[in-house]
Image (cartoon, helix red, strand yellow):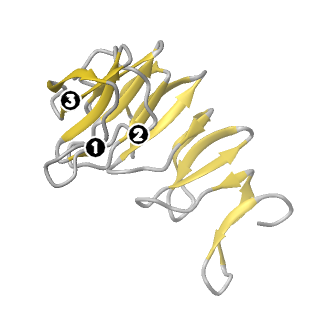
Amino acid sequence: RKREKWGFCTPDKKIIIECVYDWAVAFSEGMAMVKLNDKWGFIDKTGNVIVPFIYDDVERFSNGLAIVKIDDLCGLIDKNGNIVVPFIYEDIKLFSDELLRVSVKMYGGCGFIDKLGNVLTACIYDDSIWWIFSEGLVDVGLNGNSGFLNKSGNVVVPFIYDDVERFSNGLAI
C-alpha cells in the first residue's frame, strides 16, 4: 500500500503491479479482486484487467466462478467475465463440493441452482446460513420444519422435524 492506494509486489518488495487501486485482495486462481473508483473488477498477475470495473461487490474465484453483484442483485461470472448465472438473485453462496451447487436466496426463500444456472429447487426453503452438504445431503427448513435434500434437490428426509444437524458417519442428529 502506498499513499492510500494498493498494488502488488514480490517478497523482495519489487513492485509488479503499481499501487493504483482503492483496494486489493490477494490472488485466487490467477486473478485478484481490485477496486477502482468505487467499482470492483479482476486483474491477472501482470496487472491486465480481465474483468472490467463494473461490479458493486465481488467474491474471489472458486472453481472458475466468482459471485458478483450489481444493483443489489447477484450473478456468477467465469474467468473471462462472461455471465454464467444472470443477476436475478438476492444472494448466492458457492459450495465447494464437486458439483458446485449454489444456494440462492430470492424474495425471502432459498433454493439451489447448479453452476450453469439450471434450477434444481424452487426458492421455497427457509433461509439458513449453513446450507452445507454432508454425505451428499443438506439440511434445510420448510415452513419452520427441517428435513434433508440430496444434490439433485430431491427430498430424502421429509420436513417433519423441529431441527436437524448434518449427517456424519451415516447418522444425523
Identify the mark nearer the N-term, 3 or 1.
3
Kindly state the secondary structure of the residue where label 3 is placed.
strand
Q: Give me the C-alpha separation between circle 2 and circle 3.
A: 14 Å
Query: In this rendering, would 58 be left or right of 144?
Result: right
Q: Amino acid at mark 1?
A: Arg
Contact, CB < 8 Å: mark 3 with mark 1?
Answer: no
Please give the residue where the numbered disc 3 appears in the rendered image: 149
Q: Nearer the viewer, residue 49 or 28?
A: 28
Specify few, some or many for label 3: CA neighbours under 10 Å numbering under 14, 14-19, or 20 or more.
Answer: some
- Image coordinates of residue 162 in percent, x first then y, are 34, 25
Q: Which image quarter is the N terminus in?
A: bottom right
| For discs 3 and 1, the disc positioned in front in the rendered view | 1
* Disc 1: which residue: 166
Answer with the quarter of the image where residue 101 lies: top left
Element at label 1: loop
Q: Which residue is mark 2?
A: 130
Locate residue 59, reporting x and y percent.
51, 45
